[in-house]
Image: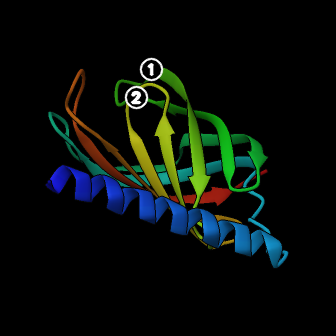
Amino acid sequence: MFRHLRILSLALALCFAFAVVAQAKKNGEQYPNLLGTWESAIVGHIKGHGFIAEPPGRVTIVISEQNGAAFTGTKSWKSLKGEAKSTTFSGVLDPTGKEGYVAEHDDGFGFCKQVTSTSMVYIYLESGIGGSPKALSSAMKKVK
């Protein structure tokens, strides 16, 4: 019974979200332009490495495509061992255009909140399945 209530609640929430987005588009509201290169300083914790604080430039996010609320791109970074790494991701903005949700195509999830047109806070979470669990916070700045 509780499973049916959860499914119904989810369906109602999705209908409401689509209605809000449709109304926003009807009123001519636009989503912010996220296209470009974003760099950040990072603080957080990684199991097995402890607390970290990394300077700007350690992580670069390039948002290469955006269609309304949806966007996609590539995240590049240097591991704590100095190895160059990258992954691709898909994301979507909420109906206000101020908060976003990102699913990396390999493993983790991100949540972002736009502060200004050239800055945002990005929270990244990754479980320990197949790697090291981590919780990181980035102060992102648009550089291009």
Question: Dot 2: what SS?
Answer: loop
Q: Position of residue 60 (x, y in %)?
A: 60, 41
Mark 1, other Cα within 10 Å: few <14 / some 14–19 / many ≥20:
few
**Which image quarter holds the N terminus?**
bottom left
> Which residue is at 53% across, 69% downward?
16
Q: Is residue 52 visible?
A: no
Residue nearer the viewer, 74 or 3? 3
Residue type (three-letter) at the residue carrying disc 2? Ser
Apparent side of residue 113 relative to residue 31 in the rendered image (left or right): left
**Residue 106 in view here:** yes
Pointer 2: residues within 10 angstroms few (<14), some, or many (20+)? few
Disc 2 versus disc 1: distance between alpha carbons?
Answer: 5 Å
Q: Is residue 10 left or right of residue 21?
A: left
The numbered disc on residue 8 is none
- Which amino acid does the dot numbered 1 rest on? Glu
Closer to us: 39 or 113 = 113
The residue beneath circle 2 is 79
CB contact under 8 Å: marks 2 and 1: yes
Question: Which residue is drawn at the image coordinates 72% and 55% (left, top)?
Answer: 34
Q: Would you identify the image quadrant in which residue 119 lies?
A: bottom right
Secondary element at image label 1 = loop
